[in-house]
Image (cartoon, rainbow, N blue to C red):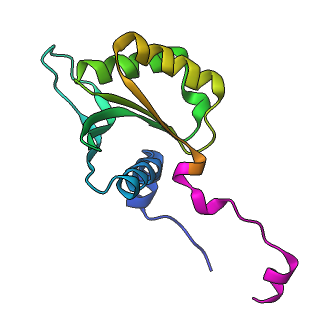
Amino acid sequence: MHYQLNSYIDLASDQGVLPHLLVAAALRNKHPETFLLLGTKVFPNDGKPPEVDIFGVCNGEVLAGEVKTKAADFTDDQIARDTELSHRLGADTHLLAAVDEVPVEVVANAQQACDRLGLKLMILQKADLRPGMAFTTTRANRSQR
């Protein structure tokens, strides 16, 4: 047997679609009245058309933010740009999400940036996005297969 991703799935994987979908599913699971746009180019009144990973309404508030496969990709400059964009878009809450664990220093940096701009901060990470991944296989489980 030979398995190969088809070109659409390969492109979706390269573009980071899966982490975005995990975030959307986690938010909808927690707040069913959530309406999101994923990977959207926005046109705020200041004329600078950036792309935002997550934009929409969650739990009655405007939410905007960034999703990464690896939390290590959240540099200080990245966080500053992302929180500024959330502020420009009129968000109430800035979302910082990663499929792995978000380091404490990244959370602290994002919280400081949000505090400066008057934004709430929402963090989603491994435990939120991949809750079923925390399992172990025991010898008894293997023998039942």
Corner quadrant of residue 7: bottom left
> How many marks on residues?
0
Direction from residue 26 to residue 42 in the image, left or right: left
Furthest residue to the bottom?
144
Q: Which residues are magenta?
A: 128-145
Q: Quadrant of the N terminus?
A: bottom right
| Looking at the image, residue 119 lies above or below residue 41 | above
Q: Quadrant of the C terminus?
A: bottom right
Q: Residue furthest left?
A: 45
Name of the residue lying farthest toward the right? 139
Q: Quadrant of residue 90?
A: top left
Residue at image x 65%, y 30%?
103
- 77 falls in the magenta region: no
Q: Residue at x 12, y 17 (%)?
A: 45
Q: Quadrant of residue 136?
A: bottom right
Residue 40 percent location from the top left of the image: 26, 38
The residue nearer to you, when weighing 33 against 56, is: 33
Seen in the image, is 129 located left or right of residue 132?
left
x, y (%) of residue 121?
A: 43, 28
Residue 39 location (% of width, % of height)? 31, 40
Q: Which is more toward the observer, 74 or 91?
A: 91
Vertical placement of 37 versus 8: above or below? above
Say whether residue 144 is magenta: yes
Would you place residue 60 above or below residue 139 in this image?
above
Q: In the rendered view, tell whether residue 143 sits above or below residue 93.
A: below
Residue under the point 26% across and 36% down: 61
Q: Position of residue 120 (x, y in %)?
A: 38, 26
Residue furthest to the top: 116
Name which residue lies at 35% across and 55% down.
Answer: 28
